[in-house]
């Protein structure tokens, strides 16, 4: 989130003081990203250092006012025109959590997914309720219609994001189920020994074969005219994927 450019956008509408900028920023975004006054004044100091704003006197109450400069307007214009860079995405705590949960001892990743899904659905419901309120405010023609429209756009972005997150969680759970089933079938096939195959239910078919005149025991080879000599099958170690917890 660019607090820097958000403050520049507010200052383009006219000189303002720090706490006023904080109030207007939170009003425009519905307090989705709350600011503290110290954060605002720190950002204003940096903008002034960079020549993007300047102090423009005081208001009647003695508040120091800040005004945008021509360099600040050019910076703001470039910000509006340039797409948001997605080549270095911000760290996502949920994605990191699931990545760390894969194979972590004592962690049931499906429980982690289900818990997050419940929270995501609840958030989606809350955002949808707030969206209905915002639409009502916009349609009523209230004096703060500009802020209400901005808040509505932010809410709809949050709704789309939570919907995508819910779909991604469903995908993660389905992916884990498929990988777990595949690992179980692979382990069963390895347990059957050379020549063995896995049945559709994941159990192993014996790998023995019979020669003419002989009868094969499971896992053994038959000698002509006789019965098969049982040979203990070689059982390879389970694959890494099969032995990893949570897969």
Image (spheres, rainbow, N blue to C red):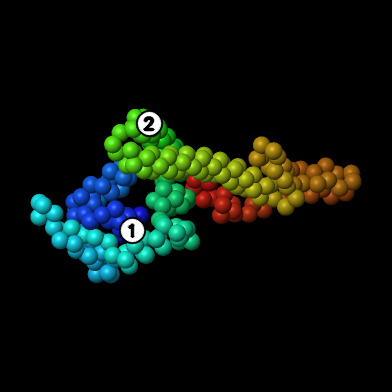
- Name the residue beneath numbered marker 2: 139
Instruction: Say whether disc 2 or disc 1 marks the residue closer to the N-terminus.
Output: 1
Which disc, if any, is residue 174?
Answer: none
- Spatial CA distance of label 2 from label 1 is 29 Å
User: In this orientation, does residue 55 appear?
Assistant: yes
* Vertical relation: 152 (above or below) 16: above
Residue pictured at 72% horizontal, 42% vertical = 205
> Badge 2: few (under 14), some or many (20 or more) residues near its Cα, within 10 Å?
few
Q: How many marks?
A: 2
Q: Dot 1, how many residues are within 10 Å of its Cα: few (below 14), some (14-19), or many (20+)?
A: some
State the residue at coordinates (35%, 54%). 1
Q: Nearer the viewer, mark 2 or mark 1?
A: 2
Give residue 5's mark.
1
Q: Secondary structure at mark 1?
A: helix
Between 136 and 41, the one nearer to me in the picture: 136
Residue 185, x across and y down, in percent: 64, 44
Residue positioned 51% across, 40% down in the render: 167
């Amino acid at each position: 989130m660019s607090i820097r450019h958000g403050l520049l956008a507010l200052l383009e509408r006219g000189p303002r003081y720090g706490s006023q900028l904080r109030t207007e920023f939170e009003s425009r975004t519905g307090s989705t990203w709350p600011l503290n006054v110290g954060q605002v004044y720190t950002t204003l100091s940096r903008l002034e250092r960079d020549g993007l704003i300047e102090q423009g006197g005081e208001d009647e109450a003695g508040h120091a006012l800040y005004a945008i400069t021509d360099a600040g307007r050019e910076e703001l214009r470039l910000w509006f025109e340039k797409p948001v860079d997605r080549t270095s995405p911000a760290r996502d705590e949920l994605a990191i959590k699931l990545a760390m949960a894969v194979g972590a001892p004592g962690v049931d990743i499906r429980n982690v997914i289900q818990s997050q899904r419940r929270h995501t659905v609840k958030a989606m419901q809350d955002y949808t309720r707030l969206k209905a309120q915002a639409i009502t405010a916009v349609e009523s023609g209230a004096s703060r219609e500009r802020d209400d429209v901005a808040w509505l756009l932010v809410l709809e972005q949050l709704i789309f994001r939570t919907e995508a997150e819910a779909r991604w969680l469903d995908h993660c759970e389905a992916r884990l189920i498929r990988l777990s089933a595949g690992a179980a079938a692979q382990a069963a096939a390895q347990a059957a020994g050379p020549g063995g195959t896995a049945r559709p239910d994941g159990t192993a078919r014996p790998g023995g074969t019979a020669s003419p005149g002989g009868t094969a025991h499971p896992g053994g080879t038959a000698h002509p005219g006789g019965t098969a000599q049982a040979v203990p099958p070689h059982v390879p170690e389970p694959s890494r994927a099969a032995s990893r917890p949570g897969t």
